[in-house]
Amino acid sequence: MNQTPTPEGTTVLRIATARGRWTLLATVLGSGVVLLGSTVTNVALPHIGEDFDADLAVLQWTVNAYMLTLAGLILLGGSLGDRFGRRRVFVLGTVWFAVASLLCGLAPDTNTLIAARALQGVGGALLTPGSLAIIESSFHPDDRPRAIGLWSGFGGIGAALGPFLGGWLVDGPGWRWTFLLSIVPALVCVPVALRHVPESVGAPHQEAARAAGWWRAGFDIPGAVLGALALALVTYALTEARDGGPVASVAAVGGVLAGAAFLRVELHSDDPMMPPTIFASRQFTAINVITLCVYAGTGGFFFLTALHLQIVVGYSALAAGAAMLPNTVLMLLFSAHAGMLAQRLGPRVPLTVGPLVCGAGMVMMLRAGPGASYVYDILPALLVMGSGMVILVAPLTVTLLASVDASNAGLASGINNAAARAAGLVAVAALPLLVGMGPEAYRSDAAFDAAFTRAMPLCAALLAVGAAVSFGALRQTATAPHPPHGRTHGWLTEPPLVSRFIRHQAVE
C-alpha cells in the first residue's frame, strides 16, 4: 500500500466494497473514542471526588482540561491533517488518545488525572477533523452522503450509550474503567486504518507548500497558542476565583490580554486560523453568537444534571446515565427531519423556538429534588429538553453552512465547532461560581440542590438570549444548503465538523 499522501480524489471508495466498509469502520471508531471521552466522564465525577477526597474545582478541571485542549487545538489539528496526510494524523491522534486514556485510568492523583485529560483533548483535536475529512476525500460523490450518514448515525449511538456504559462501569469495576474503555475501539481502529484507509492531503495545502515551504504555509501556530492560552487562563480564573486570590486575578487579566493578542494575530496573519473576513457575513456571525449561548447553557445543564441525579435524587451512576438516554434518542430519531424542515422554511422560527423549548425543559428539571419520580418529574423535563434540541441543533448546522460560500464551509464548521466547545468549557468553569456552589457542595445534597436550583434559570436565560439573537438577526428565508452531508447534525454535545479543505467537492 502506498504510504505517501496523494491529492484528494486519487482514491475513490464505494461503500459496497470491502475497503470502503473498513474505512468507514475506522472513522466511526476514531470519532467514537472522542465521543466516549466527552460523554462518559460526567457520571463518574462524584466517585472520582470520593476516591481522591477532592473538591469541586478538581471535578471541574477533570471535565475542562479535556475540553480546553480540544477546543483550542481542533482547527490546528485539521490543518495538520490536510498538510501531512489525514490518515497519518488521524492514526497519530487515535494512538495519542489511547495512551492518554490509559494514563487517566492509572492516575495516582488528581494532578496526573487532569494532565492526562488535557492530553486526551490534544489527541481528540488531532483525530476529530480527520475522521470526517477521510470520508469526504475518499468516497465516491454518489456514496458520500450515505457514508457520512452512517458515520453520523453510529457516532450518535455511541454518544447515547456513553453515559449508560460509563454508569455501568462506575457501579461495577470502578470509575477508572470509564477511561480505559476508550482504549478498546482505539486498538481496533489503528490497524484497520493503517491497512485500509487511503492517505490524502488537501490540494490547497499542496499548492501553498510548493510556494512557501511546508514549515510555513497553512499553519497559524501563534494564533493556536494564543487562543488556547486565553481559554486556559480565563478558565483557571473562573474555576479558582472563589479562593484563588491574586493568582486568579492575574490569570483573568492574562486571559484578556492573550485574547486581545489572538485577535491581533488573526487580523494580521497571512494565513489566519480564524480569518476575520468570514465574519463579514451577518448570518454567520449571528449563528456563532447563538452557538455560544446555546452550548454554554446546555453544557452547564448536562454537567450539573449528571451530578444532581446522583447527589440529590439518589441515583446510582448507571441510573443517572440511563436517565439521560431519552434526550439523545429524540435527536437520533428526528434531527434529520428538523434539518430538512429548516431548509424549506428558513432558520428564524426553529432557532427562536428551539432554545426557548430547551430553556423550559431546564426549568422543569427544578422538580427533580430528593425523592423525585422519574416518570412524573424527570422524564418530562428531559423530553421537553430533547425536543428543543431537535428543533434547534439541525437548523443551526444547516444555517451555518448556508451562511458562507461553499469554499469556506469547512472553515465555518471548524470555527463553529470550536465556539461550541469553548462555550461549554466556560460554562462549566463559571456556573458553580455564579450560583455560589462551594468547594464541598457536591458532598451535601441540600447544598447542591440549592445551587442547582439557582443554576437552571441561568442556563435557561442563556438559551433565551440565543433565541432573542435568532429572532432579531436571522432572515426568515429558506436556505440554499451546500450538497448534503447526511445526518451530520445529529450530535448532542457539539456541532459536526466538516473538513476545512474539501472544497472542490462541494460543487461536484
Image (tube, helix red, strand yellow):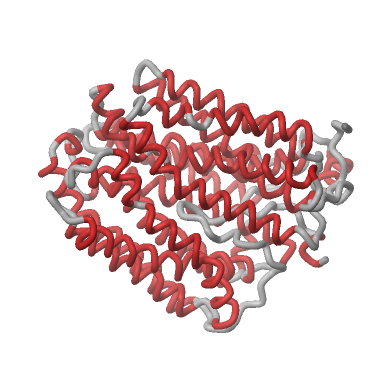
| Percent of width and height locating residue 480 | 66, 77
Q: As drawn, which residue projects farthest toward the top? A: 108
On the question of residue 482 being in view, the answer is yes
Identify the residue at image location x=64%, y=45%: 129
Identify the residue at image location x=42%, y=31%: 178
Location of residue 438 (image quadrant): top left
Picture quarter with the C terminus = bottom right
Compared with residue 347, is residue 5 higher up or lower down, i.e. above or below?
Answer: above
| Percent of width and height locating residue 18 | 79, 44
Compared with residue 267, is residue 46 higher up or lower down, i.e. above or below?
Answer: above
| Percent of width and height locating residue 397 | 56, 64
Compared with residue 117, is residue 219 higher up or lower down, i.e. above or below?
Answer: below
Identify the residue at image location x=45%, y=50%: 160
On the question of residue 285 being in view, the answer is no
Compared with residue 448, is residue 488 higher up or lower down, i.e. above or below?
Answer: below
Nearer the observer, 410 or 12: 12
Count every numbered label the image shows and give the total: 0
Nearer the observer, 283 or 29: 29
| Percent of width and height locating residue 498 | 65, 55
Nearer the observer, 309 or 480: 309
Picture quarter with the N terminus = top right
Q: State left or right for residue 75 relative to residue 48.
A: right
Location of residue 285 (image quadrant): bottom right
Q: State left or right for residue 321 relative to residue 344.
A: left
